[in-house]
Image (tube, helix red, strand yellow):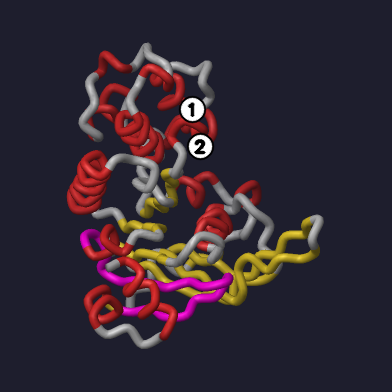
Amino acid sequence: MTAPLLSAHDLHVRFEGRNGRVDAVRGVSLQVQAGEVLAVVGESGSGKSTLARALMGMVPVRQGTLALAGEGVPLAAAARSLAQRRRIGMVFQDSAAAFDPRFTIERILREPIALLGRGAASAPPVELLDAVGLPASLLPRRPHELSGGQRQRVGIARALAGAPQLLICDEAVSALDVSVQAQILNLLADLQQSRGLALLFITHDLSVVSYIADRIAVMYRGELLETGVAAQVLDRPSHDYTRRLLAAAL
């Protein structure tokens, strides 16, 4: 039996703040199969984005294990090999804050080469832009000269630079207008099909989930409450919280 592309077991993330200790992720276990789209849904503060950062190795994980295609992976990004880091790319919510405003688009797209090694780049910047439907004429521009939808496409292009097998999309369309959301969702669906990518798609918007997801995982207060095939979770949810989420989306 083929191992899942991504397997996380019993992840715990805890933050210490002025008001005490916050358990942002509590005992989360999940799997993402090669080529599938798993949507992680829940309201603001449910721990979705913290989970994404834990999988990327961007926040300290107090407990748990992580594996890629059956191979154990260190929880901290700095301890991972270049090959392991290349296998996962991430698209962030705020395209304006995701880039250094002083950098040109070309430099933004070349940055992963410096971080992941010269052998990591799947294509030069002009080909990465073409993959996300943007012209090469944008290469000398800076982020503030682009629209929100264009910046998010650049974010996707940057995430593709290491030729990943999995993209983690953290509220990747929530800051965009509805019409632009649809364009970005179509782009992600096309890339997922053409490149055989798996997507871990984090969102609070259940209308988005119904369009893109193969399976759905529901989070609440740091815990994973329910996981299942998208149609089953949306039509016949097993948990009261999921039913409340669906009712609020109507």
Q: Is residue 52 left or right of residue 189?
A: right
Mark 1–mark 2 Cα distance, whole angstroms, equals 9 Å
Between 99 and 46, the residue placed more toward the observer is 46
Q: Is residue 28 left or right of residue 156?
A: right
Q: Is residue 93 left or right of residue 193?
A: right
Amino acid type shown at disc 1: Glu
| Secondary structure type for disc 2 | helix
Can you identify the residue that label 2 sits on?
116
Q: Quadrant of the C terminus?
A: bottom left
Residue 198 place in picture, x, y as percent: 32, 58
Crowdedness near tag 1: few (<14), some (14–19) or many (≥20) residues, C-alpha within 10 Å: some
Residue 29 place in picture, x, y as percent: 51, 75
Task: Identify the residue at horizontal 48%, vertical 48% (top origin).
Answer: 83
Q: Main secondary structure of the magenta part?
A: strand
Residue 90 place in picture, x, y as percent: 44, 46
Can you identify the residue that label 1 sits on?
111
| Above or below: residue 193 compared with residue 22 | above
Task: Identify the residue at horizontal 24%, vertical 54% (top origin).
Answer: 196
| Above or below: residue 117 compared with residue 187 | above
Q: Which residues are magenta?
A: 211-228
Residue 246 disc label: none
